[in-house]
Each structure stands twice: as structure tokens, then as C-alpha cells.
Image (cartoon, rainbow, N blue to C red):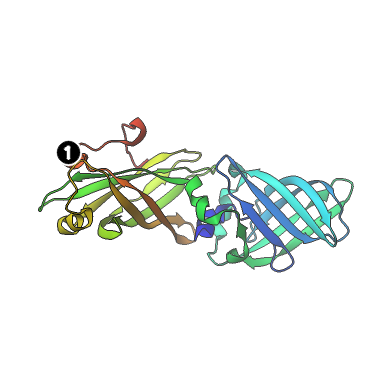
Amino acid sequence: MLRWALAFLLLPSAAPPVEIVIDPGPGSSFGLVLTGRAAGAGPGEFRGGVSVNGSTVEMPLRGRAERRGERLRLAATIPYADVPKEWLNGFRPDTFDYRIHGDVIGAGAVSWAGSMRWSDVSIVGEREALSHFVKLASLELTALSVKHSEGRAVLAVTNPFAFPITIAAAEYRLHVNGEEIGGGAAREHILRAGRKNAPLELPFRVDHGSFLAAAGFDWAVGADLEAGLSGALTLRLPAGEVAIPFEFLGLLGTDGARSGVFSHPDGATSLSPH
């Protein structure tokens, strides 16, 4: 699930001997806690580096080390921009190799290496973490007739990394009052490095009969309806494509079906894919 989306930041650690906890956070940095064998190292300020899957490019690792019995806990706050783009080249969806090394100032050295599964990495607030980067900005019906019923959703997508991310495709289904009424697919979209709340437009088709049945007899054009949008964004990586599932609940606006005008979210005037 979200571990795939966060694969860029799931930093090295080890199988049973090393534990990893990541706190994605909504800002420009994420929290990382690594716990492994102390091997003589004590508490203090830690300086070192991390590499994954044999990459020669390291990510700086700086933080605080705490001794807990025979284990050493390293806690750091890392800017998303420090995650190397080169790590994508060797990305594997199931497992990764890692190497962590460095020194606790005046208290010994740390050297951990091995391999583990992404599923063994703990993510704080995993179910909510995707919402830090992808939000439902708008959901609206723009046409309603027996011959032509459609609408558009807009996602506000943030790329916190220092390299572009390619959304190769998106597929999704729309529900009203719990009943599926339509769906759609979107073309490739490139998110520029460091882009915040970039609009990603998701057009959808609606089955006219299914919509009216789900809306109910009391519904009138212009009234909002409880709706849900679910599907997946497919990220294109050098090693292949990875699907990131999403599900949003909100209100489906229907005034556009009467006026034929789509309301851009937050005053936006462009929904360019770039």
C-alpha cells in the first residue's frame, strides 16, 4: 500500500536485527528511527550515511543516538529533498538491501548492513499518510442527460522530493450514496520537483440511470451528494511501475450539470498536466 508510495524515503535498516520506523509528516521533512545492535557505541550525536540496493550515492544521516540495553536507537529528521534520485534505479517492490554507517561523537562507531522487506518497515499513521501528499480538491458533475453524463475530480498532489515524479496513469471509480455510478482514467502527468498541491484532473463518465437511482427521488440538480472516489495512481519508476491505491470521501457538486461550468478548486485557472 502506502509503503510503495513512500519507497523513496523508506531508509535502510535491517531484517530482525534492525527495526525501522518512518513518520512521513506533512512538511518538508520526515522522521526516521533506526534501532539495532549497539556493538559498543553509546549515546550522543550521530553523523553518518545511508545507501540502499548497492547505490554508490548516500543520503546523509544526522541525529541523536540513545542506548537501550544492548540496542542503539538512532532518531533523525530528514528533508525529503535529501533522498537521492539514484535510489529509484535499483528499487524493488518487495525487498531492499541497506547499509548504514557512521559515528556517535565520542561514543563509538555504527555499521549495520543487510536486507529486509518493505512490509517490515513501520510507518506512523500509515492509513493517513497519503493524505499529506494527495488530497481531494474538487468533485463535480458537469453534465447530466440520457446521452451525456460526466464530471471531473481534481486531486491536489504534492511532490516533496528534489526530482520529478511521473504518474503514468490513473484509474478510478465514482460512488454516490454507496452505489457505483461511473468512473474513468487519466493520462500521464509529470509532477515537478518540490511542487505543492499541483492539480491533477480526473475526468469521469457517469451512467445516467445509475446516478438517478443512487441520488434518490428527492434529489434536485444543484444539490450536493455524498460521494466517494477510489482507484489507483500508477507511478513510473526506472525499474517498473507501482500502483498506489487511494480512496476519498466527499461531496459531489452538481450545480455544474445545470450551468455547464466546472468550478476550479481554490481559484485555480489552469489544470495543465505539467
**Residue occupying the point 70% across, 53% down:** 33
Q: Is residue 58 visible?
A: no
Which of 121 and 55 lies nearest the eye of the viewer?
121
Report which quarter residue 53 is drawn in. Answer: bottom right
In the displayed structure, 107 sits above or below 243; it is above
Above or below residue 141? Residue 176 is below
- Residue 47 at x, y percent in the picture: 77, 46
Residue 222 location (% of width, % of height): 20, 40
Name the foreground residue: 55 vs 213.
213
Q: Which residue is drawn at 48% across and 48% down?
A: 131
Q: Does residue 26 appear in the picture of this structure?
A: yes
Tell me which residue sits at (51%, 57%) in the image: 2
- When asked about the image quadrant of residue 63, the answer is top right
Which residue is at the front of the view, 262 or 110?
A: 262
Please, what secondary structure does the residue beneath circle 1 have? loop
The quarter holding residue 245 reads bottom left
Task: Say which amino acid is labelled 1.
Answer: Gly
Neighbour tally class for label 1: few under 14, some 14-19, many 20 plus, Cα within 10 Å? few
Residue found at the far front of this picture: 218
Looking at the figure, which quarter contains the C terminus? top left
Direction from residue 234 to residue 33 in the image, left or right: right
Give the x, y percent position of residue 232.
39, 57
Q: Mark 1 points at which residue?
A: 260
